[in-house]
Image (tube, rainbow, N blue to C red):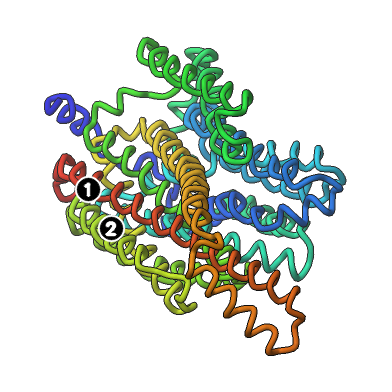
């Protein structure tokens, strides 16, 4: 293994001949392409809060409207694995520009969709276009910056992956409430048009890449059709399983059972198939590099934590404490501010400190933050909720940026497209799994606590009877008729019970995430040290 990694590292010396900056300032490239990637990531979260408005506006049920989210995620998941191949064949700059243009056009079609079917079709196109933006952005940055400057560049890119999921629900809620759901898609149009012009002006297609593409076309383009069909079916079915499992009661649904089986069979078959190909669609030999393998696994973990908590913390505040969507979003935004502060610091440190030390420290802080969240209660204030989110979100940049930095050490430059695709697949899968498993866990624990607590709510329980009498007496003293007061007292007691049930379920979820982080922590020690400038 060590010999193999040494051989790979020897072939991975960085040179500027693949830089997307050309003769221009490379930070212009970072800014332009990161804006495009931010736009795409934002669209994975911004539509969540508008689903009820979409359903009402297009005369459909809420369950039908959820396909607006699912269709985007499925299309996105299918394209990400082949984004490296498409970039090699079409040309990296051309493919990126076409993706931005197609994403912009699809966004306009989403905003103007007259029916739910049209909207879902436009979202599929939007997801397909957006699937290549993040991997190609990452590959451009890796090729444009030498290793000793790469952390700072990845920090800028980190804004797109870390901040967008946090501000998406808040921005989506504000736009929907103040204007209409159409504008959560239409705001992409002017940004996309400007981005296309900026890409043409400031992003270069290096001579080295043009030569490699010409040579590839001269030899004849080979597309791994079977590999693509397997990974498309596998990841697409996995996204459907994760996104709709909770709504359809998981494996009690024939549909969800079928998609889960299809996903498992196709992904396993894909791995076997790719390992036997001379020209695979995804270069799985990259996993021989220990740092890359561990990096992919930990990026998946980061996706679980980032997307899972971003989804259910606002849900906790709304369901348990009765916060409005805007107030819940503001509490989440406090964590976004902490992340904004942490991203540039993480970028600077990842160029100077061993990545595994930063990652280990971030996991320890994350575990402590989750432990702190297990002590929250229904009596917590807005300040308590916001501060808890700050501590939980602060370590995320110190996970994502050093992980991405370390994962590319030893990866040959001509494999950066494949490495980016694999890392982004891991992050997306982690996000989908994190959201779905946490939602299922919270639902199951809520049912457990509800059944346990309601067993004691009967006339034989003195505390129950005393509580009902106290509430009834208070209501009658304010002029409420006795019969109505007794019914209201029962309803209030039950409402308070449900609040406690939900809170206990969320606390259990924090415990599980904390244990998960602690169990994964020793894996970081297996990462190799990275020589300065390697």
Earlier sequence position, callout 1 versus callout 2: 2
Residue at 30% from the left image edge and 59% from the top image edge: 366
Count residues near mark 2 (Cα–Cα under 10 Å), then give few for <14, some for 14-19, many for 20+: many
In this view, 423 is above or below 376: above
Q: Which residue is mark 2?
A: 367
Decide if residue 365 is on the left or right side of residue 168: left
Q: Position of residue 338 (x, y in %)?
A: 40, 70
Asked whether 19 or 397 is in front, the reply is 397
Decide if residue 308 is on the left or right side of residue 71: left
Q: Which mark is residue 230?
A: none
Asked whether 397 or 269 is in front, the reply is 269
Q: Quadrant of residue 172?
A: bottom right
Residue at 36% from the left image edge and 10% from the top image edge: 276
Is disc 1 placed on a helix, strand or loop? helix
Rounded to the nearest angstrom, the CA distance separating label 1 from label 2 is: 10 Å
Quadrant where the N terminus is found in the figure: top left
**Can residue 25 be seen in this snapshot?**
no
Residue at 16% from the left image edge and 50% from the top image edge: 532
Q: Position of residue 463 (x, y in %)?
A: 48, 70
Q: Which mark is residue 521?
A: 1
Q: Position of residue 116 (x, y in %)?
A: 81, 42
Q: Could you tell me if the residues under marks 1 and 2 are in contact, i.e. CB atoms within 8 Å?
A: yes
**Can residue 242 be seen in this snapshot?**
yes
Count residues near mark 1 (Cα–Cα under 10 Å), then give few for <14, some for 14-19, many for 20+: some
Asked whether 264 or 429 is in front, the reply is 264
Is disc 2 placed on a helix, strand or loop? helix
In this view, 414 is above or below 123: above
In this view, 230 is above or below 178: above
Quadrant where the C terminus is found in the figure: top left
Residue at 54% from the left image edge and 37% from the top image edge: 242
Residue at the far front in the pictured view:
460
Decide if residue 128 is on the left or right side of residue 433: right
């Amino acid at each position: 293994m060590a010999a193999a990694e040494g051989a790979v590292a020897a072939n991975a010396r960085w040179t500027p001949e693949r830089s997307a900056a050309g003769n221009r300032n490379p930070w212009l490239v970072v800014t332009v392409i990161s804006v495009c990637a931010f736009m795409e990531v934002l669209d994975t979260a911004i539509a969540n809060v508008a689903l009820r408005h979409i359903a009402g506006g297009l005369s459909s049920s809420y369950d039908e409207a959820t396909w607006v989210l699912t269709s985007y995620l499925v299309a996105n998941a299918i394209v990400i694995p082949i984004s490296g191949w498409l970039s090699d064949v079409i040309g990296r700059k051309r493919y990126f520009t076409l993706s931005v243009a197609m994403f912009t056009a699809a966004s306009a079609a989403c905003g103007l969709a007259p029916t739910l079917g049209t909207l879902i079709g436009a979202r599929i196109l939007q997801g397909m276009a957006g699937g290549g933006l993040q991997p190609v952005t990452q590959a451009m940055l890796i090729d444009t910056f030498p290793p000793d400057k790469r952390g700072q560049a990845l920090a800028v890119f980190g804004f797109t992956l870390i901040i967008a999921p946090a501000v998406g629900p808040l921005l989506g809620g504000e736009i929907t409430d103040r204007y209409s759901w159409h504008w959560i898609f239409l705001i992409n149009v002017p940004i996309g048009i400007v981005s296309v012009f900026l890409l043409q002006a400031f992003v270069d297609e290096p001579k080295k890449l043009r030569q490699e593409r010409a040579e590839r076309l001269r030899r004849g383009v080979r597309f791994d059709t079977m590999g693509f069909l397997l990974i498309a079916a596998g990841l697409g079915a996995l996204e459907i399983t994760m996104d709709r499992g909770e709504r359809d009661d998981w494996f009690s649904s024939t549909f969800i059972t079928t998609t889960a089986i299809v996903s498992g069979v196709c992904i396993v078959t894909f791995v076997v198939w790719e390992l036997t190909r001379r020209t695979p669609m995804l270069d799985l030999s990259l996993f021989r590099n220990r740092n890359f393998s561990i990096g992919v696994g930990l990026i998946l973990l980061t996706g679980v934590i980032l997307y899972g908590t971003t989804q259910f913390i606002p849900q906790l505040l709304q369901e348990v404490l009765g916060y409005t969507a805007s107030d819940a979003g503001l509490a989440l935004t406090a964590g976004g501010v902490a992340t904004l502060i942490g991203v540039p610091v993480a970028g600077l440190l990842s160029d100077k400190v061993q990545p595994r030390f930063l990652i280990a420290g971030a996991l320890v802080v994350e575990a402590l933050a989750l432990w702190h969240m297990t002590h929250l209660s229904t009596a917590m204030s807005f300040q308590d909720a916001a501060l808890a989110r700050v501590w939980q979100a602060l370590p995320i940049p110190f996970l994502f940026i050093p992980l991405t930095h370390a994962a590319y050490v030893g990866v040959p430059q001509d494999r950066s497209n494949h490495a980016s695709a694999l890392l982004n697949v891991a992050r997306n899968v982690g996000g989908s799994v994190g959201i779905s498993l946490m939602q299922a866990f919270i639902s199951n624990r809520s049912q457990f606590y509800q059944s346990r607590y309601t067993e004691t709510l009967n006339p034989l329980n003195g505390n129950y009877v005393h509580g009902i009498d106290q509430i009834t007496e208070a209501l009658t003293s304010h002029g409420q008729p006795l019969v109505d007061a007794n019914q209201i007292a029962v309803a209030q007691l039950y409402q308070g019970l449900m609040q406690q049930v939900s809170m206990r379920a969320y606390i259990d979820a924090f415990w599980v995430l904390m244990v998960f982080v602690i169990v994964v922590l020793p894996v970081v020690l297996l990462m190799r040290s990275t020589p300065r400038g390697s």
